[in-house]
Image (cartoon, rainbow, N blue to C red):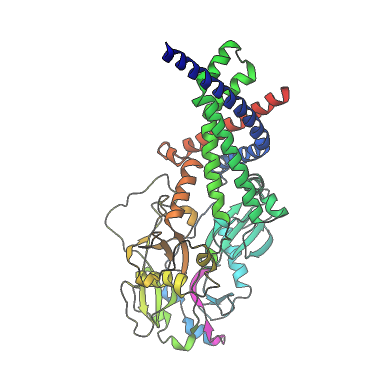
Amino acid sequence: MSKEIKQKKSKKKDSKFVKKIKQHMYKWHRVIGLVTIIPVIFWTLSGLMHPFMAHFFKPEIAHEKLEQPIIDKSQLHFSIQEVLKKNNISEFKNFRIVSFDNATFYQVKNIKGDLLYFDTSNAKKLENGDQKYAEWLARYFLDDQKSAVKKSEIVTEFTSQYKYVNRYLPVYKLSFDRPDTMEVYVETSSSKLATYNPTSRQWFIWFFDTFHNWSFVDAITNNSIRIITMIFLLSIIGFSALSGILIYGLLWKQFKKTDNLAPKKGLRKYHRQIGIWVSLFTLTFAFSGAYHATTKWTPYTLSQMVYEPTFETKEIPIQNNALDLDWTRFQNASIISLNDTTYFRCQLLEKEKFKTPKTDSNSKWNKKDDKKSEVIYINAVTNKITPNIDLQYAEFLAYYFTDGAPKAACCEMAESSDEPKIALEDTKLLESKVLTDFNSREYGFVNKRLPVVKLAYDTPQKTTYFIETGTSRLAAVVKNSDMVEGYSFAIFHKFLFMDWAGKNIRDLTMVLAALTILIVSILGFILFLRK
């Protein structure tokens, strides 16, 4: 008998304890909901727009990339050395060949970093050549030769309209006099389209930046305050979601009893029914968003990671139009320095293979007409091809961007590194390969640059470098911690786990999840106002 009485007492104690938790939990759930209602509305509304704009209402452009044509050797009437001498240029950073307006030019980067253009047929300089080439590129990408250019300007840093996700700097921004007020950003040094924004996209970028990234806080104070504010509010929202899961999930039996005694109708009923499912989505959005915000402390300086030695014209004996190569496949040439030796880096159209390549019909980057190129290095003194230099050069650049680089150029990597400084030359190289296509799991489209050399090193953080040898740039650097955060954001914030159903279904799921969070938040707010 005594045991039965004790058991009954313990049950009563438990129920009182649960009631107290319930009372406080309800109270805090309401308070947290009120505190975060405005941030939740901001984030869900702007989040709803992202998949809509990214996939369902994405603006189209005529050409997204410039195909590299075969350059006829006869067009190179003057060599780069002859052109530079005729124009009294004794030193330069690099050169390459571009074709536009029915002419072929040497694009030369001088010591100051300016891009100059010289006609390969007569060695004459093209005045305002870089601006003219930028306009030609923009018109090519748009397939618009009629609309007037309202404004042409050079963008040297990322802005509210030209975000760091576009990667390329510096770029030209060209605004066209068209009904859609199209703005096109191009990088003339690589002939790449950085991004394009019609009116709808301009408005969306402003809205998303203001209400999802909270740029208005940045404008009032600074980046650190913005990140702290976002993380604080996202943490509160996370606690709100947890309390919702506890109330409607773990303690559901207790609430079910009270609901049977006094059934809830109308808004209160729907708020509770939807709440448990929404709490789960809210928790994943809030957690991944806060985790992602922690990566924004340091400024983005990857665009500064470029190796640009100075070359003297007189020290390059072999003329570029006399190189010993297959000119029927020649697409371009530049120059590099490796181990105190100068090489011509030549891009040739890949030899035809007697088999049809497999293509992904859903990918705009893997079309049948997307022809690959091969790269060869020719010694500028002996005029002989030196094999396997591309990987060696990539390894040198990885070393340069860590141990060997001037600290001013690599400040971000030096400051943000959370592992002991290790000389790459003493570190085992686990993997090296050339990537010619984007792979979302390894090197995604967000990184922009291709082709790149992947170099994975046996460091404590398993650091992997992606080097674009064509421009001597660091395209990306990834550590284990970056991968964990990246997967967290991709899975919990962008619903990567729904990739099996296709992008449209995945984004539709995201839209529905954000929409239900918005509805439940508004229902809860209306309930409070009624009370």
Residue 188 in which image quadrant = bottom right
Q: Is 126 drawn above or below residue 272 in the view shown?
A: below
Give x and y (percent) for residue 287: 53, 42
Residue 56 in which image quadrant = top right
Residue 441 magenta-drawn?
no
Residue 204 in sight here? yes
Residue at position x 52%, y 17% in the image: 12
In the image, 236 versus 314, the foreground residue is 236
Left or right, 349 with respect to 200, comes to left
Q: Which residues are magenta?
A: 86-99
Give x and y (percent) for residue 70: 42, 67
Q: Quadrant of the C terminus?
A: top right
Query: Most extreme residue toward the bottom, as rendered?
Result: 314
In the image, 375 versus 76, the foreground residue is 375
Q: Is 47 drawn above or below residue 326 in the view shown?
A: above
In the image, 327 versus 526, the foreground residue is 526
Give x and y (percent) for residue 228: 62, 50
Q: Is 171 drawn above or below residue 6 in the view shown?
A: below
Q: Is 88 drawn above or below residue 294 in the view shown?
A: below
Give x and y (percent) for residue 46: 62, 41
Q: Quadrant of the N terminus?
A: top left
Query: Most extreme residue toward the left, as rendered?
Result: 354
